[in-house]
Image (cartoon, helix red, strand yellow):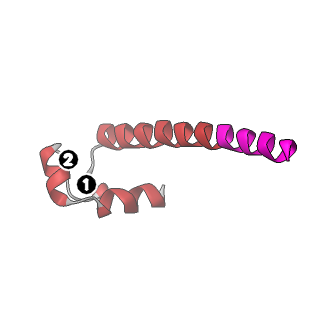
Amino acid sequence: MKNLEETYNMMPTIVKQHAGMPDNFINLTSDQKRFIIEMFDIDREAVKATLMETLEEMKGLVNEL
């Protein structure tokens, strides 16, 4: 959660303003926090799936050598 909070706070203020979001994570409403957390979880799962596919491809290449 700390990483998510830091990442949100590091985003440019103008981007958050255009989205109608507060500048600091601590000022998010419960619904806004839930939204951000869900986006983070979905993105993390997509990255994990891509990395697992890449790992399997690399294993196949190593076995061919």
Q: Residue at x 47, y 60 (%)?
A: 3
User: Position of 26 compared to 52: left or right?
Assistant: left
The answer to whether residue 20 is left or right of residue 8 is left
| Amino acid under disc 2 | Met
User: In which quarter of the view is residue 52 placed?
Assistant: top right
Instruction: Give coordinates of residue 16: x percent, y percent.
Output: 20, 51
The tag on residue 21 is 2
Q: Which label sits on residue 27?
A: 1
- Give the main secondary structure, helix, strand or loop, of the magenta stretch: helix
Question: Is residue 64 covered in magenta?
Answer: yes
Q: CA distance from mark 2 to mark 1?
A: 9 Å
Q: Residues within 10 Å of mark 1 (few under 14, many from 20)?
A: few
Secondary structure state at the residue bearing disc 2 = loop
Image spot of residue 7 (x, y percent) = 38, 59
Residue positioned most to the front: 65
Amino acid beneath label 1? Asn
